Image (cartoon, rainbow, N blue to C red):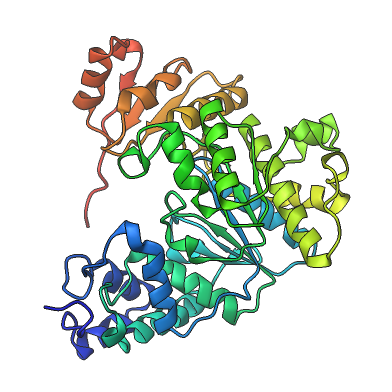
Amino acid sequence: MTAGAHLPDYTAEEVEHFRSMGVDGAMDILLGMPGRPSYTGVGDSREVAVEMMESYLTRLQMDISRLSIVHVAGTKGKGSTCAFTNSILRAHGVKTGMFTSPHLIHPTERFRINGKPISEALFLANFWAVWDGLSATTSKAGIYPPIANFFRFFTLMALRLFQAEHVDVVILEVGLGGRLDATNVVKNPVVCGITTLDLDHTRVLGDTIDKIAREKAGIMKANVPVYTIAQPDVAAQMLVKCALEHGAPLVVVPPLSEFNISTHDLDHSLGMHGQYQRVNAALAVVLASAWLAARHGTPLPPFHRMISPTTLQGLNQAFWPGRSQTIEDPLSTAVFHVDGAHTPLSIECCAHWFDSCCQARDHRILIFNCHHERDVVTLFLPLLALGFHHVIPSVQEALLKANLDIAGLPSDAFTVVERIERPSG
């Protein structure tokens, strides 16, 4: 079968059935596409991902050149940096659109307008507009899959949504990498940011920090300012090299303590807690300030005068679920400290944050979820020193203890509690 010929996979009746199921139906039809003839094509490769996105935009008759975009890449802190940036700009009266991934509970969380997830109705209107637009133009797909894959589809949705809702700014988080990411179809962002770089997704992005830095730097554009934070030397050198290649001015943002912010505000005025969030907040202050300066045609203020009372208000009101989040159980004395750390560096930051929050807590329980492709021991090691009494792992008890024993780590320092499945019925 020739890719792009037609969509034989779902009948019209099946599509209408999915359409009648609301958001669940939209997710089901999209998640059911992999492996279907209409989903794959000669050009179904990450190496042509940007060209593929350009093809989809053409088929959907979407011109995104007028969107005003803040583009953010990096290994750690992308979501938090976007959330800080979004909150600062909202405090300045800007209508914001923000696209991030993944979602925690509901897919509408990926698409936010003025900080709030969009409604299911708005999600569905844009989902089916993209689906129907691509379905009606399969003859123009050429070598590319007629229907975009999951993340590319959602990126198309986001760009369409923010155009239709006439937002002032789009805060666009890269999904994976940068150079070959679907979001890199954007050609003229106002400003770009690169957050903390670390080893992650090494099978796709490369197994060294400089290879990963090059992939992240792929979002750089000629004459578009790029801001980053202090990076490991090898990563920093690669970013400088890539900036020169792209003709993009690169600036390293100083620590937040070097901005015009008091020690009290530094400790108490960030909506997201933890020492590492100061790094994300500093980058966000500069990204938001650069966007505001471009909008008003004014010079970018120096770092020591960049945090106005309004910007400080934005920092204070920032919130990002599942990142250094503390949740108190109203029905008990239990306090949950939640974080999505999943690289060695971020686990260390998470451990430091948790320990600083729980000095007075005598009993500690760890619920530890680790994807099967990640190194359990490497991620678990920084948590051993925190004195947990019980561990509830997502991996099997035997697997966790075996990995710790192989590494020579004390698996008898705590009790591993097997998960209890909720009874059916």
Q: Which is more toward the observer, 309 or 197?
A: 197
Relative to 394, does residue 17 appear above or below in the rendering? below
Q: Which is more toward the observer, 263 or 120?
A: 263
- Quarter of the picture containing the N terminus is bottom left
Left or right of 41, for residue 327:
right
Q: Please state the horizontal and vertical placement of residue 265, each as a whole percent of the image.
A: 81, 36
Please give the name of the residue rendered at 39% of the width and 68% of the height, measured from the top-left corner.
51
Residue 199 sits in quarter: top left
Q: Which is more toward the observer, 18 or 287?
A: 287
Please give the name of the residue rendered at 67% of the width and 61% of the height, measured from the top-left corner.
190
- Quarter of the picture containing the C terminus is bottom left
Residue 333 visible at all: no
Q: Please state the horizontal and vertical placement of residue 183, each as a whole percent of the image.
A: 48, 62
Q: Residue furthest left?
A: 1
Residue 262 sits in quarter: top right
Please give the name of the residue rendered at 66% of the width and 36% of the height, measured from the top-left corner.
279
Q: Please state the horizontal and vertical placement of residue 356, each as a whole percent of the image.
A: 62, 23
Left or right of 68, for residue 354:
left
Q: Please state the horizontal and vertical placement of residue 192, each as a whole percent of the image.
A: 62, 53
Q: How many marks?
A: 0
Residue 120 visible at all: yes
Left or right of 24, for residue 292:
right
Relative to 316, does residue 261 appear above or below in the rendering? above
